Image: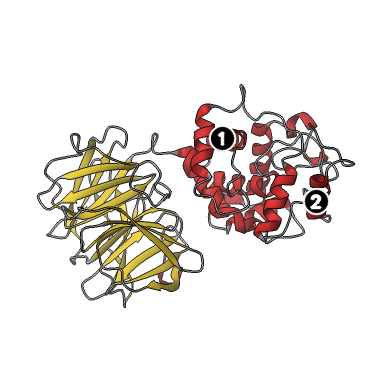
Amino acid sequence: MRFTLRTSAAVLTVLTLLTTGSTTSHATASSDPAAEAARTRALAAYPTVPCVSGGPTAADAAAATRLNGVLTGSLQGAMTAYRVSCARAVVNAVQRRGLDERAAVIAITTTIVESTIMNISEKIDHTSLGLFQQIDSWGSETNRLNPTWATNAFLDAMEDFYPDGSWRTAPIGDVCQRVQRSAYPDRYRHQVADAQRIVDELGGPAASTVSVYGVLADGRLTYSTINPQTGDRTKTVVSTDTLGFMPKALATLNFNTLLATSPGGVLHRVDVITNNTSLQFATPTALGGGWTHDMLTYDGHGHLYGIADGTLMSYVVSRPKPATSQIGQRAVIGPGFTMRTLAASGDDWLVGISTAGVLRSYRIAADHTWTGATLADRWSTFDRLISPGYGLYYGQTGDGALYRYLDRNPYDFSGADLQYFGNDPVDTRGWTQVLLSAQPFAG
């Protein structure tokens, strides 16, 4: 049954949560979980139109179930196949335009706030319609209810406000606000993490290549690629030059940027020039001392984690090729992290093997507290563990083999869905690197 303004208390609730004073739309400014949940329920009472031809699919329903296990913002526990289908339409429009994942996260963040990712066909606030709640001045009703048109209109405005790709480095919440012109500019940033998780879910590893950097015992770098579907190693190139020091820890920020620490505790940025048919890199750039970490890992979402003497710490990396001042906001997560190897498995999620040979998963909260669980025991065979995300784990043995695993839900603190491809490893020998680091799919 369709609710009306006269009969629906939910609709009256949503109107109290909406606000005036914006030229675009008027979603709630509250970051209070109860208020956000009330608004999500209220908006669900409004009529919608499909976002994709044929409507939601079984794959959309499965994705909604997975997302309901990991979302923490206003859509916590509220993802539906329909919402996933609408998010898919937005992400596809971004991809067809040739823009990268960050643009998709910006667009999805906006739709979470504006419509809870629903293509709303009734004017809620003045003349607002659709996923982005665009008013009449944006275009016709037909256009605003077309997810592809609406997404491109949003991206047009974004690129107008942020020329020369400057939206790539501006805070995502600020970009959303600049386009939407809300009277409450703080509302978007609270949904960025969930938008990233949604984009990650819809992207998946199928179209990606696992990229792995390594360091040989003589200081040379290696670069290998792995097909995530088949587990086959598809390329390995080795540098001629050495780093000039033997790194103690290694983290991959993106396809052409590494961080490495010297034995003396100096952090270096390594800029890769090419990793196609050969591996070449510029002279490492020293970023400062005091980096005595035994291991480093980057989650692809701006968070660098390190362990020094059993204490886990986090840092914020604010640029793709950071200078000294762009790696900061050091926070101590806590002691007791006696790990033999550590990897990032997602946004503020870590996975590692303890010195006792136990596979552990950790979630780091915004207030730097943590929750952890054991996924499996008897993992002492592996000297190193790496993960590009999406539940893909690769373990390197002391005799040079690389084995692969798939965690069907890497965010459920359970190893029951951990699949082992023991009969189909990446390689049974040849992985002789003393350090390994996977590029995050998000990086």
- Give percent across and percent down for residue 414: 37, 49
Tag on residue 88?
1
Q: Secondary structure at mark 2?
A: helix
Q: Nearer the viewer, residue 261 or 362?
A: 362
Among all residues in the image, which is located at the extreme top?
54
Q: Which mark is residue 13?
A: 2
Residue type at mark 1: give it.
Arg
Q: Is residue 237 left or right of residue 299?
A: left
Q: Residue reaching furthest bottom?
A: 290
N-term mark: 2 or 1: 2
Q: Residue at (20%, 39%) from the top-left corner?
A: 426
Give the residue displayed 73% in from the left and 33% down from the top: 48
Given residues 371 and 116, the one toward you in this image is 371
Q: Is residue 23 visible?
A: no
Instruction: Find numbered disc 1 in the image and state the secondary structure of the residue it sits on.
Output: helix
Question: Residue 342 falls in which quadrant of the image?
Answer: bottom left
Q: Residue at x 42, y 54 (%)?
A: 300
Q: Position of residue 93 (x, y in %)?
A: 58, 34
The quadrant the N terminus occupies is top right
Q: Which mark is residue 265?
A: none
Nearer to us in this view, 139 or 309: 309
Which image quadrant is residue 82 in? top right
Q: Give the residue furthest to the right.
A: 6
